Image: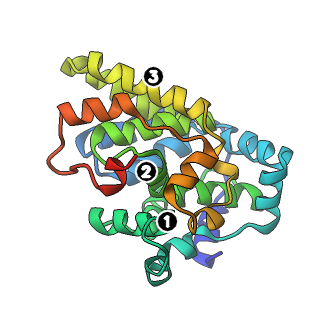
Amino acid sequence: MREDVKGHWEISKSNRRRPLVAWRAMENLLKDGEATGEVFKIIEALKGNAFTRATDRLRASDEGDLRLAVKPDILEMLEDRETLRKLPEDSLGHTYLRFVETENLSADGLMDASMEAPLQRARDEDEIWFGERLRDTHDLFHVVTGYGRDGLGEIALLEFSCTQTKNLGIRFVVYMSNRQSKKDGNWEAIKPVMEEAHALAQNTKWFAEQDWERLLKMPLTEVREELGVTRPRVYKEVQAANPDPEHPPTEYELAA
């Protein structure tokens, strides 16, 4: 682990929730939907014991316990674009590469955004690894699930992630987005997309305990089959009816 990142995770105060901090960050996020750092501030302010509970769940499963014992650095693999480029074109890793290059993203961009949210208490090594891995695989989850980077796709993926990780901070972001949709008169179209994302997450293997280092080398179709990921049909229908010119559907979405 990089020393500067490790030091960031070791900031310690308490584990109590800070709703006012979350609200201020949410106000900033509503003004600028691309302010990813504000999302991390919200998650940190409202997380409570979410990371502790999730890490305990990992320890309780054979796959999760194995991941914690090894603590592989997925960020290093996702940043190695030359190695990803050499993978078969139908592999998850190569598809992920095309996705981040099309969207002008980088795996360490999320790391930089997360540094804007100083942590409120020290975490043990397992919790540190778990938090970093969830952060670093967010864009990978876009590719696996088929949810795009349009506004609806981002919120649907957060609903999916929140259903799997039970994080109140993510739930708050989803709630406020849904609330805004109701004000804008878009809720009737968006509600079934959120319900679908919730159902898909419940019927999919827990992403947090997966061996993504192995899965990156496999065909995307086989990865989806192994994890039980099915096409988000309602989302695709709403996305097609309301296209986002800034984030048109990409190859991985069309194949979902």
Depth check, mark 1 against mark 3: the one in front is: 1
Identify the residue at image location x=28%, y=25%: 180
Residue 24 in sight from this viewpoint? no
Residue that label 3 marks: 195
Amino acid type at mark 3: Glu
Residue that label 2 marks: 142
Depth check, mark 1 against mark 2: the one in front is: 1
Q: Earlier in the sequence, mark 1 or mark 3?
A: 1
The answer to which image quadrant residue 206 occupies is top right
Where in the figure is residue 197, as x and y percent of width and height?
Answer: 47, 31
Amino acid type at mark 2: His
Q: Earlier in the sequence, mark 2 or mark 3?
A: 2
Give the SS element for disc 3: helix
Residue 198 in sight from this viewpoint? yes
Give the SS element for disc 1: loop
Residue that label 1 marks: 91
Viewer-nearest residue: 127 or 65: 65
